[in-house]
Amino acid sequence: MLEVFDLSLRYGKHLALDGVATNIERGETVVILGANGAGKSSLLKAIAGLVKPDKGVQIKLDGNPIAGLPPHLIPSMGIALVPEGRGVFGDLTVEQNLLLGAYSSRARSGEEARRRHVYELFPKLAERRRQTVNTMSGGEQQMVAIARALMSKPDYLMLDEPSLGLAPVVVTELFETLGRVRETGVALLIVEQNVRISLSVADRGYLMEAGRIVGEGTAAALRRNSAVQRAFLGMA
Amino acid sequence: MLTTAIIAGLVLGGTYALVAMGLTLQYGIARIMNLAYGETMIAAAFAAFVLKNALGLNPMAGLLLVVPAGFAFGYAIYGVMMRPLVARAGDRSALEIDSILATFGLLFVIQGVLLVLFGSNYMSYSYLNIPVSILGANIAANRLLALGLALTIGLTLYGLLRYTRWGTAIRAVAVAPQSAVLVGIDVNRAARFAFALGGALAAAGGVVISMYQTFTATSGVTFTMKALIVVIMGGVGNLLGALSAGLILGMVETFVATYLEPGLTLAATYAIFLALLLWRPQGLFGKATR
Ligand SMILES: Nc1ncnc2c1ncn2[C@@H]1O[C@H](COP(=O)(O)OP(=O)(O)OP(=O)(O)O)[C@@H](O)[C@H]1O
Ligand SMILES: [Mg+2]
């Protein structure tokens, strides 16, 4: 289980996260909803060790504290992040991106089988192993980003707005694939603006507003939640 | 005369290429503009000289001692001098400026030590100074060895960086350090390693040069400048670029010296540099990114 207790985080004076508490079980799919600037990315970045939370904050993986670890150690704990904007290696080929995905020692055993599995999930990438990622479409680059993260053998895969800037068909396809990733037992922590589709794959969700968690519940309950309906689903 | 000039040009160019590869690693990956680079080379040249004259060790064996020492020196310098700058620098350009100032100081420290130890005379030693005939031209065996060494070391390094996971990781740090962290690469460690590897290449270049050229405690600056020109010609961080640009520069210098006027070689070098800065600042082979 990945648990966040009372997480506060500041950029200078600006309090971006204010006492956030979340948890996600192995194999679970959890979505984090919230308007722009709510602090969703900051939460994922804090878990990934990319931004330093306030002192004394606890983030625990299976009961072991991981807050304050340098970011390059997080993938080896089984936590992978696909950041906003994807963070692929644009100058490298698909193959090389996947090779680096399996950089941490944890990812080395069974690497070949995982590569095969990843290419099955994303057949388009298999056809384009040798293509430089820069030259690919946005949807394809998002696939590379997810494929690369999967190569690290994650127990928890965090995705920051994977649908951003993609055409609706591509988004549908992407979430179908995420559904299949979920079936392999990888827990997914997804930040999304596209509420309808993300709730369709999720078990549970949190609602964030101005750095706080203001609501949580099962996907079905959130879909019925009037605040969610008003803010995201365009219902009166 | 043409064959002689071509081979001499290749030898000189090969050395430039080798030396520039080290600088491009330090600058392209560790983001440190090392103005003391040439001094590291010259220190290695003196080390080869001492090993040869005092201990009777031939420079090939000397290489096996001096190159690891260059690596260790780079590793130590990074830890002591560069790490604090990296920690303090907010962004890349701040680090570039800080590192230029710091290594400018280091340049004079190394040069001072060399001047005290060896004075300001030109030095050389004789090693494999036997003529070999190639296509009717007579070339000293030590030059051929220098060319062979430069190409072997350069291509091996290229192969490692291009075809191994470790090398791919190093390149990833150069192009996208924020993303490198996401796959578990320790960017600081990679930078330190790249800097140290640059030190090893500088040392290799110094030993190779000492095999066929005279050198003095103050010749470092010229080598730094030439390495810098080659790096910019080849595109920062581009090893094959450095290799080809090094060979081009060596050829041009040799041809100018042979057919025009030896006094014009430096002028020719800088003319190329200036033209490049004006028309292709991203390098001959680089994409126009930055
Ligand atoms: N590096 C930073 N420096 C200063 N302020 C920042 C920084 N990163 C984020 N913030 C601020 O922190 C708050 C939360 O940002 P965050 O990126 O976590 O929001 P978000 O929910 O991901 O928003 P979006 O939906 O637009 O991606 C915002 O007010 C933002 O302006
Ligand atoms: Mg965000």
Image (tube, helix red, strand yellow):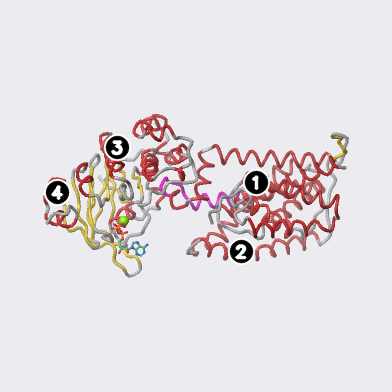
How far apart are labels 2 and 3 at the CA level?
49 Å
How far apart are labels 3 and 1 at the CA level?
49 Å
Query: Residue B62, image x and y in percent?
Result: 74, 44
Label 3, residues with CA under 10 Å away: few <14, some 14-19, many ≥20: some
Mark toward the viewer: 4 or 2: 4
The residue singled out by tag 1 in the image is: B68
Secondary structure under tag 3 reads helix
Amino acid at circle 1: Pro
For residue A172: magenta? Answer: no
What's the magenta region? B181-196
Q: Is residue B64 left or right of residue A192?
A: right
Tell me if the residue at label 2 has its CB under 8 Å from ligand 1. Answer: no
Asked if the residues shown at circle 3 and circle 1 are in contact, with their CB atoms under 8 angstroms apart, the answer is: no
Q: Chain of mark 4?
A: A
The residue singled out by tag 2 in the image is: B100
Determine whether A214 is above or below B137 in the image: below
Q: Chain of mark 1?
A: B
Amino acid at circle 4: Arg
Mark toward the viewer: 2 or 3: 3
The residue singled out by tag 3 in the image is: A177
Q: Is residue B5 left or right of residue A120?
A: right
Mark toward the viewer: 2 or 1: 2
Query: Residue A225, image x and y in percent?
Result: 12, 53
Q: What kind of secondary structure does the magenta stretch mostly adopt?
A: helix
The residue singled out by tag 4 in the image is: A223
Asked if the residues shown at circle 3 and circle 4 are in contact, with their CB atoms under 8 angstroms apart, the answer is: no
